[in-house]
Amino acid sequence: MARKETGWDRLAKAASDKNGRGRRVLVPVLGSGFVTQAALDGARRIAARGGRRPRPVDWLEILRGVASDFGLSRAAGHIETDVPGQTTLLWDSMLTELAAERVSPTSRAAHKWEDELRRAVAERLADDRATTRVSRPFVRSFFKLGWEDVLTFNFDSVLLPDTARPAQRLDGGGARASLAARAGNTTVWFPHGHHADPRSIVLGARAYGARVAAMQAAFDEHARVPSPRPTERLPSWVATVLERPLLFVGLSLTREEWTIWWLLAQRARFLARRPPAERPPAFVFARRPAPAERLEMHGAFATLARACELLGVELLGFGDFGVGWQKLARALDWK
C-alpha cells in the first residue's frame, strides 16, 4: 500500500520548484527563532573545535536591556520567556511608563519616547556582532539552497553580507512596505524594518497600524495588475507573499502578529477565485508544546492550529526542535 502523503512531502515538492533563473520559488518567512537556531548551530561548531562557546543575544534580552537603560522597572518585570505573544503590548507599556513617570512642562509625548526606544533597540542590534559572526556558517548554508526571495521579520543583519544595508524599493506601488537588500542572488525583504533605519522598526500597536496601511497600498497596487507569470520578479514583499508559496520558520505567529495575519487573510481572499491547483501553498514550521509546559503555550499552539486551518495554511508540527529541524532539512534537501 502506498504511503500517505504528508505535509513534509508537500513542502518538499514546493521547495523543489524553480523559476527560469534556477532559483527556488518557495519563499522562507523568518523570525527570531531562525536566528536562535543559527546561533546555536554556530556555537556547537565552535565548542566541537574546543573553543569557548559564545553567548548570542536574544530578543528578550535586548528588551530587558532597553528597559533597564530607561529605568522601566514595571515593564522589565513583565518580560517573561514563557508567555507568548506579549511583545506588542509590552512595548506600549514601556512607552506609557516613560510618558507617565517623566511628566514636566517640557516632557515628551509617547511617540517621541518611541523614537528613543527604537534607537536604543537599533544600537543594541548593531553592537551584537557576536550573534552575526557565530550564525554565519548556518546562514551561508541556508542561502546556498538558492532562494529568489527571503522575508525576515527581524531587525538585525544576520542574513546580510557585511557591507549590505536595506533600502526602500521604489519599483512598485506601496514602496513604503518594500524595504529590501541583496544577499548574493537573493532579495531579502524586511517587512518590519531594520536597525540601520531605527524609525523603520515596527514595534507597538501604533507602528503595526501604520504598517497595515502601507501594506494595503501595496496590496491595492498589485491587485490592479494582471496575474504575474511564475518566473516574473515582483516589486514588493506584499506581492511576493500573495503570489509565491511560503514557509514560515522561527515565528511564534501569535495573534499579536497583526501584519502577518492581516496579509494571510488578504492572501486567502485574493487567491480564492483561482483554481485550487493554482493557489500557492503556505507552510508553518512550529513546535508543539510538551504536556508539562504552561497552559499559555498550549493555548497559543491551539490558536495557531485553528488559524492555519481557517486560512488554508499547512501546519508542520513537531515536538522536539532537533527532530523538527532534521525534518525541515530533509524536505528542503539542505545538507
Image: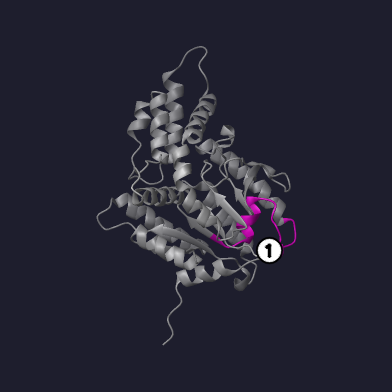
Question: Can you say which quadrant of the picture contains the N terminus?
Answer: bottom left
Q: Which residues are magenta?
A: 224-246
Quick one: which residue is furthest to the bottom in this view?
Answer: 1
Residue 318 shows in this picture = no
In the rendered image, the vertical position of residue 150 relative to residue 157, given as above or below: below
In the rendered image, the vertical position of residue 64 relative to residue 261, given as above or below: above
- Prevailing secondary structure of the magenta residues: loop
Kind of residue sitting beneath label 1: Arg
Residue 61 position within the rendered picture, expressed as x and y whole percent measured from the top left: 38, 37
Give me the residue at 54% from left, 41% from top.
208
Residue 162 position within the rendered picture, expressed as x and y whole percent measured from the top left: 57, 41
Residue 71 shows in this picture = yes
Give me the residue at 75% from left, 57% from top.
225
Quick one: which residue is furthest to the top in this view?
Answer: 105
Q: How is the image coloured?
A: one colour
Q: Which residue is mark 1?
A: 21
Give me the residue at 52% from left, 61% from top.
311
Q: Nearer the viewer, residue 209 or 33?
A: 33
* Horizontal side of residue 180 vs 312, given as left or right: right
Count the marks: how many? Answer: 1
Q: Find numbered disc 1 in the image and state the secondary structure of the residue it sits on.
A: loop
Q: Nearer the viewer, residue 246 or 181?
A: 181
Quick one: which residue is furthest to the left in this view?
Answer: 292
Give me the residue at 41% from left, 58% from top.
286
Which of the 4 quarters of the picture holds residue 317?
bottom left
Residue 50 position within the rendered picture, expressed as x and y whole percent measured from the top left: 33, 48
As for residue 131 lying within the magenta part, the answer is no
Residue 32 position within the rendered picture, expressed as x and y whole percent measured from the top left: 45, 47
